[in-house]
Amino acid sequence: MLQSLKIRLHNAHDLIVQDPSSCPDDIFSGHAPQLRELNFPGTMWPLTPVPAFNCVSSIKTEYEDLTFPEPEVLFISCPALCDLVFRSYTVDETPRAVWDTCYGRCLRKLVIYGSSETSAVLNVTTADTEYVSFSATCASVTTFDHIFQHFPGDIQMQVRGGSGDVSVVLKDDIRTRKVRWVDDEVEELLVLSVFAPILSSITTLWLGRESILSIAHIALRFPNVVTLVIAPSCPYDSTCGVQPLSFPALRRLEVESSIFAAARLNGVHVHHLARFMGSVLGCLPRSALTLVFRGGAHLEGDPRAVRGYFREIIIL
């Protein structure tokens, strides 16, 4: 039951529409030319197109209990629709044909929280889609191939999370693809196979806290990574038995702290870093790498213990 419908207008004024049942299809007498953004539960969507939403370009909604209308209604109501963000609950039970009717539509941004209806990804995203984010728990190889094939050049990869929830973000100058999954719910062989075709395009790899524990599920060798960016905790985490990784093209190691991290978490002890260089990266002294510290990250202990691995140490 709809308790409130919040409609954000283009001129930044908010209008709260109260209705005990649903959004009427003749809302605003079918005319709201300044309306650009909608934010309300998907269960309250009318089952027929809404003329007043003709200029809406951004929708945030929910997809619950299969009461969300056929997605085609969204595109008929909102021909200017560019950004769609929705929370999914039982969406995986929805027949794929529901989204197949939208084939050929192209969103600028698609974000799905919860269990993903991956046919949505296949049907309303293209090479021109700038941002895609979804859960890979129920995704197929076809879905991965579809969103990864749109990277023509160098890629930056960010990996967050360790045991349990994992998040991978791929970026180039135009596109961002974010995929989330739970280790226990996705086969390791699937993860390895879907990332394999793009490994040679990854030139920058960013590893967040605990992600050093999950990177081996994606790949052990990154042939063209020139810059490796790690959280200050990565060298310490690697003491827990991390498989060796290969970066034959590596030239730069950056240690970057989050602005939200406590100061006590910004330090990297030289003994942990030396172990990380040798046992995880397989580097030998005189590796001639550049070591960079960013965002308050710093080295603890005598730097001579690791100086042999680096031709220079920079603090930014």
Image (tube, rainbow, N blue to C red):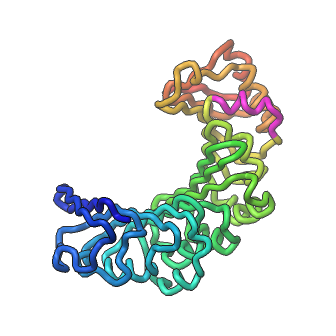
Is residue 267 shown above or below 73? above
Residue plotted at (57% across, 19% down): 264
Is 144 part of what is drawn in magenta?
no
Q: Position of residue 183 (x, y in %)?
A: 73, 52
**Res 91 → quadrant:** bottom right
Q: Position of residue 113 (x, y in %)?
A: 52, 59
Residue plotted at (76% across, 64% down): 190
Q: Could you tell me what secondary structure mostly forms the magenta stretch?
A: helix
Is residue 291 shown above or below 196? above
**Res 278 → quadrant:** top right
Q: Nearer the viewer, residue 302 or 286?
A: 302
Q: For this view, does 58 lie left or right of residue 272?
A: left
Q: Nearer the viewer, residue 42 or 186?
A: 42
Q: Position of residue 308 (x, y in %)?
A: 73, 24
Residue plotted at (73% across, 54% down): 218
Residue 175 visible in the displayed image = no
Is 241 part of what is drawn in magenta?
yes
Q: Position of residue 137 (x, y in %)?
A: 67, 61
Total marks drawn?
Answer: 0
Q: Nearer the viewer, residue 97 or 144?
A: 97
Q: Which residues are magenta?
A: 233-242
Q: Nearer the viewer, residue 174 or 5?
A: 5
Residue plotted at (74% across, 24% down): 272
Q: Quadrant of the N terminus?
A: bottom left
